[in-house]
Every structure is written in structure tokens, then in C-alpha cells.
Amino acid sequence: MNQRATPITIDPDPLAPYAICPGWVVGDLIFLSGQAAIAEDGSIVGAGDGEGDFDLQLGQTLANIERVLEAAGSDMTKIVKVTIYVTNMANFPAIVEARKTHFTPPFPADTIVEVSSLALPELMVEIDVIATT
């Protein structure tokens, strides 16, 4: 079985400076790179002086997921699996509320883990996604 793999492109691409493709379409599946609170212009949304705004970062992260899925010809209703990385598990209730807002039953399979840090020190959340076309 030979699956065709096609990179997802977006313009502007805030991940390009980091040598990361936003995602790939492989057959009927879409694999997104981890999305975080990086705006289209490359700035970090919700970064603060010593303390960021988790809700703003989560909102931007989900908006980025929507944007990349749309570029792949899909949408949030076709997500089957999410992996969520947070730097503070105290933000778990906000994650649960966001799931209720951005997903509908049956909810995607989900893994959430606390990590000591993410790629950029200001980031508080990163989410990677598997979806269908």
C-alpha cells in the first residue's frame, strides 16, 4: 500500500523560522505539528513579564489548529486524537472547558501531560492533533 504524503502549507507560516512544517496529509489522515500560542506574525500571544495568560495562549493555540486544519481541507469536527502538553497541570480545568467549547461528542481521544518547559520559554501549552480529511 502506497500512501501519498503532502505537506500542509499556510501563509504566513509562523513555524517556518523553526524549520517545522505545520503538518502533513497522509492518505485520509492529517498529522499536525504541535501548535502553540504563536501568532501569524511570529509573536507569542499571552506572554507576560514573568507570568503569561494561559487562557489567551490556549485560545491562540486552538485558533492555529483550526487554521492549519482548514488549509488541509478539514476542520475541528474531524479531529480524532489530541496530545496536550502544559507547563502547569493547574490549568487542567481550562483545558476541560476548552474541550467542551471546541469539540463535540464523541470527543477526540486525548492525552495531557505536564512538561517542565516547551520549545520557547514563554509558551504554556502546545497541542498536536491527528484528524481525518
Image (cartoon, rainbow, N blue to C red):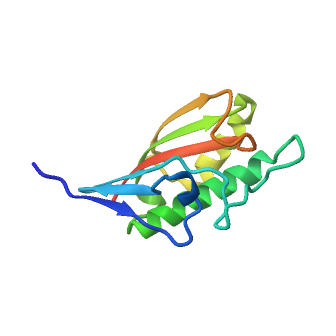
Residue, x 49% and y 37% (percent of image)? 110
Residue at (71, 44) in percent of width and height: 123
State left or right for residue 96 relative to residue 28.
right
Across the whole image, how many numbered discs are drawn on residues? 0
Camera-side residue: 32 or 78? 32
Q: Which of these two is toward me, 42 or 87?
A: 42
Residue occupying the point 43% across, 47% down: 106
From the top left corner, tell me how far across and down residue 9 is, in percent: 43, 67
Left or right: 22 as drawn, with respect to 27: right
Corner quadrant of residue 118: top right
Which residue is farthest right? 49
Q: Please determine whether, in this image, residue 10 is positioned above or below residue 46.
A: below
The relative height of residue 25 versus residue 114 in the rendered view (above or below) is below
**Residue placed furthest toward the bottom:** 11
Give the percent coordinates (x, y) of residue 55: 75, 49
Quarter holding the C terminus is: bottom left
Q: Quadrant of residue 21?
A: bottom left
Q: Is residue 12 left or right of 133 when viewed as pictured?
A: right
- Residue 71 lies, in percent from the top left, at 44, 69
Give the residue displayed 12% in from the left and 52% down from the top.
2
Residue 83 lies, in percent from the top left, at 50, 38
